[in-house]
């Protein structure tokens, strides 16, 4: 399962971080390629993402659900999605896990772990592509989170 | 779709810069054509590199220089590889099938578009580097730093690989290539290449062992290299090194499970080391 992991410290207090990460409408927009997130219920959100591979774009649609909530230090989202190609559709499983820790000076240590896995034999190729993009994706995520929280702070 | 065939490198680079993401460089087209509707849907123009004069294989004393648009057949038939330290390149290219593919596919295309091929594995074992040109000049990059992930290389927008340079190995070095595939026409399930240097006592001061298709990009079998380096290159050292090649996290996909690849990785490393050592002892 292709996994991306990033740890970083944000110059914003933990409650500001929690406000961002408990709402997928805000944090999911920090994922590079996210085109929109819609709230479905108090714990569910639908998202639309675009991924560039060579000279083409792939669309991923998914539904995320908050499954573990421990305010204000940990939240985990699980989900299912679908990646659409010209001729194929691949089922995906999604996971995003955020841990927050208050550190000195009003800063917060953020640990983000995300993974996306395609099912089936053909999905192995999708997983290889996702793996090759994961580092770029989580570091883009870090920059976008900083832009929001440190600007506000 | 527009078709451009520039007759100078500068012209090709300018075209690619102006076209941006809507343009793609091709030569043999053996990756682009079958994958056009999957991976190149935004492409509105192709820039054919075959008029740039990059079809050559020369030996200049310190290195072998291969032009990016050299076809695999031209590479095999080039006299520069015959019987010398680079014949493993010709042997590797000969195993890429079918013949029609070898006639069209180019060295640059094979390296840029198809990390799950055979030539990248051998050229990595030989410590090759790439010459990459862009509008702002050219740079050289070790092939080892080129593959960042599956279908993901260090090539930036507007850049072209123009040449592959393979350094002349020590006279006491030997190299070999081995591959597993299901049918003659298939992509490799796994391949391996090694270059082994021997000293006068028959010990190995340095070795490069590469596994292809073991992971999304070709990788060095570092544990296998360490197991061999400093040892006397006998049968026992070869077995020890090939056993060490099993500690890699082998990928699983539609062509083989990770367990099959792990077993074949051990066998492939054993075979390339036996042959490379034999060649090193016999002065290739």
Image (cartoon, grey):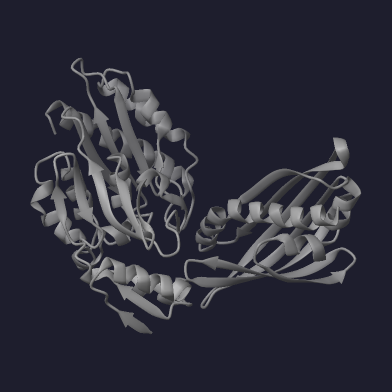
Q: Is B76 in front, or is B135?
A: B135
Name the residue located 24 percent from the left edge and 27 percent from the top edge.
B197
Name the residue located 42 percent from the left edge and 70 percent from the top edge.
B17
Q: Can residue B125 be seen in this view?
A: yes
Q: Residue A35 is drawn in which quadrant?
A: bottom right
Q: Is residue B24 left or right of residue A25?
A: left
Q: Is residue B43 left or right of residue B70?
A: right
Q: Is A9 in front, or is B209?
A: A9
Residue A86 rendering spot, x and y as whole percentages: 52, 78
Is B267 rendered above or below residue B58?
above
Is B173 rendered above or below residue A68?
above
Q: Is residue B38 visible?
A: no
Q: Is B238 in front, or is B256?
A: B238
Name the residue located 84 percent from the left edge and 42 percent from the top edge.
A107
Residue B225 rendering spot, x and y as whole percentages: 36, 29
Q: In which quarter of the image is the C terminus of chain B?
A: top left
Q: In this view, does A147 lie to the left or right of B92?
A: right
Q: Residue B236 is drawn in which quadrant?
A: top left
Is A116 rendered above or below residue B264?
below
Q: Quadrant of the N terminus of chain B?
A: bottom left
Farthest residue in the bottom direction? B1
Is B8 rendered above or below residue B212?
below
């Amino acid at each position: 399962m292709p996994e991306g992991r990033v740890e970083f410290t944000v110059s914003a207090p933990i409650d500001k971080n929690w406000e961002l990460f408990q709402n997928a409408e805000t944090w999911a927009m920090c994922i590079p390629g996210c085109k929109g997130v819609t709230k479905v219920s108090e714990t569910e959100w639908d998202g639309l993402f675009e991924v560039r591979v060579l000279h083409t774009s792939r669309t991923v649609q998914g539904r995320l659900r908050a499954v573990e909530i421990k305010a204000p230090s940990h939240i985990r989202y699980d989900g299912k999605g679908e990646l659409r190609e010209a001729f194929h559709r691949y089922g995906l499983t999604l996971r995003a896990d955020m841990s927050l820790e208050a550190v000195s000076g009003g800063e917060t240590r953020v640990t983000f772990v995300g993974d996306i896995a395609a099912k089936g034999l053909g999905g192995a190729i999708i997983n290889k592509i996702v793996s090759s993009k994961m580092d770029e994706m989580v570091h883009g995520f870090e920059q976008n989170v900083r832009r929001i929280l440190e600007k506000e702070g | 779709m527009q078709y451009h065939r520039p007759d100078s490198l500068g012209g090709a680079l300018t075209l690619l810069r102006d076209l941006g993401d809507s343009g793609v460089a091709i030569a043999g087209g053996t990756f682009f054509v079958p994958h056009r509707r999957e991976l190149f849907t935004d492409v509105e123009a192709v820039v054919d590199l075959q008029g740039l004069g990059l079809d050559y294989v020369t030996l200049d004393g310190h290195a072998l220089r291969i032009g990016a648009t050299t076809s695999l057949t031209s590479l095999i038939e080039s006299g520069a590889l015959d019987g010398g330290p680079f014949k493993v390149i010709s042997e590797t290219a000969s195993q890429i099938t079918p013949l029609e593919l070898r006639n069209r596919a180019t060295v640059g295309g094979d390296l840029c578009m198809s990390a799950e091929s055979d030539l990248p594995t051998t050229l990595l074992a030989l410590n090759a580097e790439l010459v990459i040109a862009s509008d702002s000049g050219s740079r050289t990059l070790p092939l080892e730093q080129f593959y960042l992930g599956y279908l993901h290389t260090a090539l930036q927008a507007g850049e072209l690989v123009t040449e592959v340079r393979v350094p002349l190995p020590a006279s006491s070095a030997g190299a070999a290539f081995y591959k597993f595939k299901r049918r003659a026409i298939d992509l490799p399930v796994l391949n391996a290449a090694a270059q082994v240097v021997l000293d006068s006592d028959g010990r190995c001061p340095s070795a490069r062992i590469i596994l292809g298709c073991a992971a999304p990009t070709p990788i060095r079998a570092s544990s296998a290299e360490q197991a061999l380096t400093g040892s006397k290159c006998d049968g026992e050292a070869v077995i020890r090194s090939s056993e060490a090649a099993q500690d890699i996290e082998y990928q699983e996909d539609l062509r083989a499970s990770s367990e099959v690849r792990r077993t074949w990785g051990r066998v492939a490393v054993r075979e390339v080391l036996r042959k490379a050592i034999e060649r090193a002892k016999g002065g290739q």
